[in-house]
Amino acid sequence: MAQEEQLFGYLKRVTADLQRAKGRIAELENRDHEPIAIVAMACRFPGGVTTPEDLWNLLTTATDAITPFPTDRGWNTP
């Protein structure tokens, strides 16, 4: 009888742990579905890109936007 009570106590603890784990898993899965709000955006890219729309246009047209290094930033470049 003592063994059965021990087993029952163990099973109760394991069941409680599993329920907590199940709740934590559900919490983590639901966190990935929270809405995202973009409140600001800035970009600084070569090729005259000043807006997100300009960047998208540059990408969709596969335009080459490589420019020389700026000379007004104090960089020592060969």
Image (tube, rainbow, N blue to C red):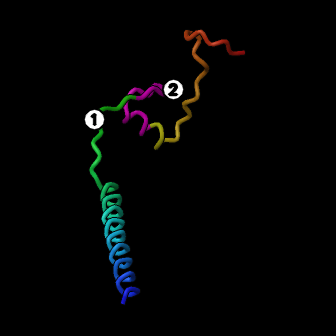
Residue occupied by mark 1: 39
Q: Is residue 36 above or below residue 58?
A: below
The quarter in which the C terminus is drawn is top right
Side of 37 where 51 appears, left or right: right
| Magenta stretch in the rendered image | 43-57
Q: Residues within 10 Å of mark 1 (few under 14, many from 20)?
A: few
Who is closer to the viewer here, 18 or 66?
A: 18
Disc assigned to residue 46: 2
Side of 55 where 66 appears, left or right: right
Side of 47 where 9 appears, left or right: left
Q: Which residue lies most toward the bottom here? A: 1
- In three-dimensional space, the C-alpha distance between marks 2 and 1, rounded to whole angstroms, equals 24 Å
Side of 68 where 63 appears, left or right: left
Residue at screen point 35% across, 32% down:
41
Location of residue 63 in the rendering, given as x and y in whole percent from the top left corner: 52, 36
Magenta segment includes 53:
yes
Magenta segment includes 36:
no
The quadrant in which residue 69 appears is top right
The amino acid on which the numbered mark 2 sits, given as a three-letter code, is Pro
Q: Which residue lies most toward the front here? A: 2
